[in-house]
Amino acid sequence: MTILVVTGTGTEIGKTVVTAALAAAARGRSVAVLKPAQTGLAPGERGDAQEVERLAGSVTAVELARFPEPLAPATAARRAGMAPVRPHEVADAAGKLAAEHDLVLVEGAGGLLVRFDDEGGTLADAARLLGAPVLVVAQAGLGTLNATALTVEALHARGLDCAGVVIGSWPAAPDLAARCNVHDFAGATGAPLVGMVPEGAGSLTPADFRARAASWLAPGLGGTWAY
């Protein structure tokens, strides 16, 4: 697996920490992380790509564009009077990184179908151009099975492979809904649960984060995760 696209069922559910865990778990491999667009950031402000770099360590972190308002990339670009990021640009950048690295992680902004440009280009379009599998990050709790199933269905409708689902912030004291998620993900969504990153993982020291990252992920994603 040279290129893996990381998406989520929404915002603020732990995509960046999951991406950092994937990068940290790929020990001994050259890893690049591509963030097509970051929104809600001023010039010079640290964003998701820089956070992955901080947590995972020796990775090449690249962002294609950043926009000041915390909106969908297409809207943020239009309001800022800036050029949007288009799917073919994402695919081109990822392809160039893949020529120089063993693993390229492309972390989207928001969900799979969030618009990059006013022509309707999305992360799904970039994944299709790349022919890359997509990992879905979900949150634990009530409603997540439906949201995840819709994302997986959208992937399959576009001929894209789903690499599985990772819970982006597994609570220290999971409620009943979260505990049931663990057993119901595969049957309800059509995709296996392949990782559980604990709540607060992003607050660990980088050294502790790197030491533990592989234990949160399934072996197929470079770790030794088991539940």
Image (spheres, grey):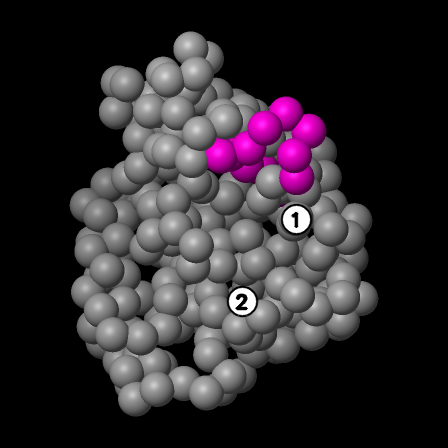
Residue 196 marker: none
Regarding mark 2 in the picture, which secondary structure is present there?
Answer: helix
Q: Please name the amino acid that badge 2 sits on.
A: Gly
Regarding mark 1 in the picture, which secondary structure is present there?
Answer: helix
Q: Is residue 130 visible?
A: no
Q: Which residue is mark 2?
A: 220
Question: For residue 97, what is the image quadrant?
Answer: top right
Q: Residue at x 33, y 24 (%)?
A: 75
Q: Is 158 in the magenta?
A: no
Q: Is 38 in the magenta?
A: yes
Where does residue 17 sit, x and y in percent of width and height? 57, 58
In depth, the one of 173 and 206 nearer the eye is: 173
Q: Please name the amino acid that badge 1 sits on.
A: Glu
User: How many numbered badges does the structure rendering display?
Assistant: 2
Where does residue 203 sit, x and y in percent of width and height? 66, 65
Q: Which residue is mark 1?
A: 51
Within-10-Å neighbours for mark 1: few <14, some 14–19, many 20+: some
In depth, the one of 162 and 204 nearer the eye is: 204
Q: Please give the range of residues in magenta.
A: 32-46
Within-10-Å neighbours for mark 2: few <14, some 14–19, many 20+: few
Q: Residue at x 28, y 18 (%)?
A: 118
Residue contact at pointers 2 and 1, CB within 8 angstroms: no
Residue 27 located left or right of residue 154: right
Q: Is residue 127 visible?
A: yes
